[in-house]
Amino acid sequence: MSIQNKYKNKYFSILGDSISTFEGYSQPKYAEFYNQSVKYASGVITFGDTWWGNLIDTLGGELLVNNSISGSHVCGKAGACSDARTSALGTEDAKPDVIMVYIGTNDWGGGARIHPENGETADERFFSFAYRTMLEKLKRYYPEAEIWCFTLGVSARRSVDDFEFQYVRYGHHIEEYCDEIRACAKEYGCRLIDLYRNAPPFDTFDGDHPNAEGMLTISEAVLQMLERG
């Protein structure tokens, strides 16, 4: 079965951060990064210009809920591991067939600790605990859904000659978080979408957020990984 046939007419929901927001589609409405002014600065102007909109259109699917909040983390009591976030990916009439989880960049960028140490209690402060809690809740709320776990992508800024991606922030290399995502995806039987290993750097207009070209880079990389199985 082709990828397009497999996902044709399927409902897709997204759990993400600013990279996956878009005015008019993100819930809650106040939490989008890609608003009217950013759309034109980035060239991401229509649904099909977003990485997820392009991917869903290519697969013949339908967006159900985009629960992406600018600045959000996996960690924290109000993070993506919360009941409020994980339970908000369906509607009264439908549940998602696929949940795309692309979040964690702000945890890495903000220095969230990955594992407890020295007898500390594991809780939502730690990325390893929070990511597993998030997947456990998604499995509970949507037991029939495919869950796709995205590792963190590498950004570029081709309009700036001396731009260098900072792989280490607050003493943690980005791949430490990617390794944890890989482990969690395997542990919970989720599909791994390994952007870090299998996607080229995506172009941005500000160093962090994809422009239209960068969005296409992400969507094409995801499609290639799906086709490879």
Image (cartoon, rainbow, N blue to C red):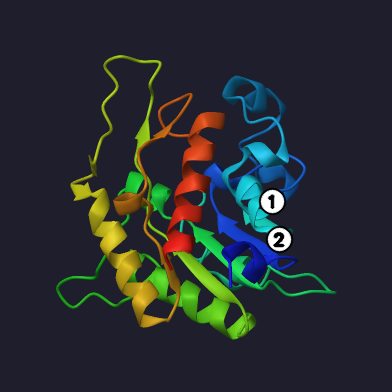
Quadrant where the N terminus is found in the figure: bottom right
Q: Position of residue 136 (x, y in %)?
A: 49, 81
Whether residue 73 is situated above or below residue 88 in the rendered picture: above
For numbered disc 2, what is the local secondary structure? Answer: loop
Question: Circles 2 and 1: CB distance less than 8 Å?
Answer: yes
**Residue type, label 2:** Gly
Give the label on residue 35, or none. none
Specify whether residue 95 is in view.
yes
Q: Depth check: give the residue in front, 226 or 127.
A: 226
Q: Depth check: give the residue in front, 125 or 212.
A: 212
Drawn side of residue 175 relative to residue 188, left or right: left
Drawn side of residue 163 relative to residue 132, left or right: left
For numbered disc 1, what is the local secondary structure? Answer: helix
Residue 18 sits in which quadrant?
top right
Q: Residues within 10 Å of mark 1 (few under 14, many from 20)?
A: some
Q: Determine the residue positioned at 40% across, 28% down.
A: 207
Q: Which residue is mark 2?
A: 61
Q: Which residue is mark 1?
A: 57
Whether residue 143 is situated above or below residue 179 in the rendered picture: below
Residue 9 sits in which quadrant?
bottom right
Q: Determine the residue positioned at 23% across, 74% down.
A: 120
Q: Residue furthest left?
A: 118
Q: Position of residue 218 (x, y in %)?
A: 48, 44
Q: Depth check: give the residue in front, 183 or 108.
A: 183
Q: Position of residue 162 (x, y in %)?
A: 26, 16
Q: Determine the residue positioned at 69% across, 30% down.
A: 45
Specify whether residue 76 is in view.
no
Residue 161 sits in which quadrant?
top left
Q: Residues within 10 Å of mark 2 (few under 14, many from 20)?
A: many
Numbered label tally: 2
